[in-house]
Image: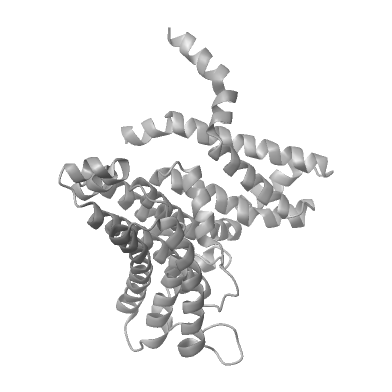
Amino acid sequence: MNKFLKWFASDSFIVSLAAIVMGLLLGAVVMMIGGYNPITAYGALISRVFGDWYGFGEALREMTPLVLTGLAVAFAFRAGMFNIGAEGQVLMGMTGASLIGIKITGLPALIHAPLAIIAGALFGGLWAALAGYIKAKRGVNEVITTIMLNWTALFLCNYIVRTFLLMPGNQRSVDIQPSASISIDWLSQMMGNARVHWGILLAMLASTFFYYFLWKTKQGFELRAVGSNPEAARYAGINVSKNIVKAMFISGVFAGLAGAFETLGVFHYQSVYSSLPGYGFNGIAVALLGMTHPFGVLAGAGLFGSLTYGSAGMSFDAGVPPEIIQIVIGSIIFFIAAQGIVRFILKPVYKRKKEKVL
């Protein structure tokens, strides 16, 4: 608990918080230039998310895939790799869950739903491990392979849906079996039919697993060692190639879970996508916002989920175009990436704090 509180008091958290404030302020300036009232707009956003149980439930639903794709990117980054392939891994997770959720029948829910979740996790993990294997054995940069695998996954998943799962006359699969659903019906009814599901809780548990595995286990130490200095890790007797594949597999599992939860808990079917849906790319932004720390990712996903869902409130209640919220999100990402600017702005604060200590 003390370490958790210490992290919130750390320089990284302060910089992230300052970046969020700066992004919101820049968004307010853009709104004023466009003739909109930022106070009214942000008030409508907050009301949309926290004004009733339905909005709160939908915001939680929105943040769930962001938590998991953010963890996917952050985990790979901690192991010294940049996983841009969470997008494709999400799609593979959707497909794995859909295949089990649709094709297997006659199983009780206590077996069917977990089996579908595991299938989605494995599909995503193995897809990411492919990029890790190519890097470990051939030295091919994972940025290149994961980008290419995103598009390969898109067309492969569309082919599987069209060939084996398609609902006739529609650009989507048939519905999954009711026993494979992870929706929480009783809670959904209490929250105005918000699409809440067990994946929300599992995403939060995934953040805890991330922290424990990476900082409390021998395997996590090896992954961080490989990420910090592969040559030093190899000299210390650590199998670098094995850990590269392992890191990418676990990263892909997180992303695959995001896809599985969307299929099993939100839509209950898989669409035929004309382009990449964007889950993985948003996860990169969440990982940056959370400084690649699991609890930071959790907080960053909460912010992004609230902004994304709440943007509808800005549009309907305050008349602000939804594109404005993308400017706000983009501004936050900019200030997170350009930490030198944030630290320069915060320099007087740090100087005053230092003088106070002395």
Q: Position of residue 139 (x, y in %)?
A: 33, 56
Can residue 175 be seen at all in this image of the molecule? no
Residue 74 lies, with reference to residue 191, above or below; the image says above
Q: Position of residue 131 (x, y in %)?
A: 37, 63
Give the image quarter of residue 316. Answer: bottom right
- Residue depicted at 51% across the width and 80% down the height: 158
Q: Is residue 11 left or right of residue 226?
A: right
- Residue depicted at 57% across the width and 24% down the height: 344
In the rendered image, which quarter contains the C terminus? top left
In the rendered image, which quarter contains the N terminus? top left
- For the residue pair 5 and 131, the one nearer the viewer reads as 131
- For the residue pair 235 and 108, the one nearer the viewer reads as 235
Give the image quarter of residue 334. Answer: top right
Residue 192 lies, with reference to residue 103, above or below; the image says above
Q: Is residue 186 left or right of residue 170?
A: left
Q: Position of residue 124 (x, y in %)?
A: 38, 67
Number of callouts in the render?
A: 0
**Going by the picture, which residue comes out furthest to the right?**
35
Q: Is residue 143 left or right of residue 273?
A: left
**Going by the picture, which residue comes out furthest to the top?**
358
Figure colour scheme: one colour
- Residue depicted at 44% across the width and 43% down the height: 296
- Residue depicted at 77% across the width and 51% down the height: 320
- For the residue pair 282 and 145, the one nearer the viewer reads as 145
Can residue 338 be seen at all in this image of the molecule? yes
Q: Position of residue 150 (x, y in %)?
A: 48, 67
